Image (tube, rainbow, N blue to C red):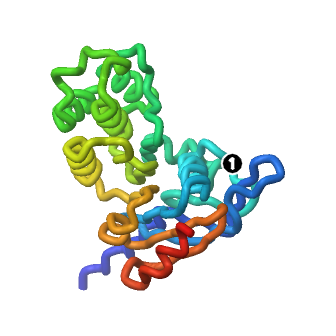
């Protein structure tokens, strides 16, 4: 009889938070957040301005330290094991983190070198984003939509397993928003991605998320699967 194949260990959750607290001085910006998002799932972050959505994304990106509690992404403790997820987490901030005096290509090459990603991915992403004709343009000369597209391309370098997206379609015209949304939904290198998306559109969040986290004054006001959320709960979140 042939030996049984070895058991495969279950995939680590994409995101695990346990009593996460983040302070800014004496102010509590995030208050006792606990949740688990399976690998490959999508978490939507909803809430009014100042609710703590961007702060939570920055904690998940390893840019801010939790003041208390635990934060694990892709099975690794942050910030202690931040090096273990280098290149595996892509963060698209609300304000694109690009060098405005460098060209589109120079920005992508610089990011690829930092992440130790294959430089060949730069040309693939320029093609995927339709930026080949603007590759030699400085970022300062680009429209808001093209700047966001460049930032998205930089975010997708190194095939990240976890995407952190902070209002990625804000301030874009409908055509640019559709193009950028399609790019972020696509998996050009075949990677099954976990996503955490902050935004203000409840309808979009309920349509594409597996789990919705509503924040209000840094606290959890709503945490449920989309099918379990009522219009009244969404309305209360923004009052």
**Residue furthest front as drawn:** 239
Residue 125 located left or right of residue 50: left
**Quadrant that contains the C terminus:** bottom right
Residue found farthest to the right: 26
x then y, percent, for residue 47: 53, 63
Residue that numbered label 1 is attached to:
65
The answer to whether residue 29 is above or below residue 126 is below
In the image, is residue 226 above or below residue 202?
below
The answer to whether 150 appears left or right of 128 in the picture is right
Residue 56, percent across and down?
58, 55
Residue placed at 32% from the left, 18% from the top? 141
Residue at (19, 44) in percent of width and height: 175
Depth order, front residue of 152/48: 48
User: How many numbered marks appear?
Assistant: 1
Which residue is pictured at 57% across the width and 47% down the height?
58
Label 1 Cα neighbours within 10 Å, binned few <14 / some 14-19 / many ≥20: some
Q: x and y percent of residue 49 in the render?
A: 56, 54
Whether 131 is drawn above or below 208: the answer is above
Say if residue 189 shows up in the picture.
no
Q: Residue at x 75, y 57 (%)?
A: 28
Residue 85 percent coordinates (x, y): 50, 47
Q: Quadrant of the N terminus?
A: bottom left
- For residue 126, what is the image quadrant? top left
The secondary structure type at the circle numbered 1 is loop
């Amino acid at each position: 009889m042939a030996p049984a194949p070895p058991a495969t260990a279950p995939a680590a959750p994409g995101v695990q938070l346990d009593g996460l607290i983040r302070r800014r001085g004496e102010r509590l910006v995030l208050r006792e957040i606990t949740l688990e998002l399976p690998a490959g799932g999508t978490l939507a972050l909803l809430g009014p301005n100042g609710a703590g959505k961007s702060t939570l994304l920055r904690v998940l990106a390893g840019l801010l330290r939790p003041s208390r509690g635990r934060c694990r992404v892709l099975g690794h403790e942050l910030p202690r094991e931040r090096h273990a997820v280098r290149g595996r987490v892509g963060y698209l901030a609300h304000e694109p983190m690009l060098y405005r005096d460098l060209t589109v290509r120079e920005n992508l090459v610089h990011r690829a070198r930092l992440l130790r990603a294959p430089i060949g991915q730069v040309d693939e992403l320029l093609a995927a984003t339709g930026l080949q004709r603007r590759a030699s343009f400085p970022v300062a000369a680009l429209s808001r939509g093209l700047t966001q597209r460049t930032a998205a391309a930089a975010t997708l370098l190194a095939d990240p397993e976890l995407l952190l997206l902070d209002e990625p379609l804000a301030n874009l015209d409908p055509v640019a928003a559709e193009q950028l949304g399609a790019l972020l939904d696509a998996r050009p290198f075949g990677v099954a991605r976990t996503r955490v998306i902050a935004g203000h559109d409840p309808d979009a969040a309920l349509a594409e998320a597996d789990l919705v986290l509503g924040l209000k004054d840094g606290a959890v006001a709503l945490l449920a699967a989309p099918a379990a959320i009522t219009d009244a709960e969404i309305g209360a979140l923004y009052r």
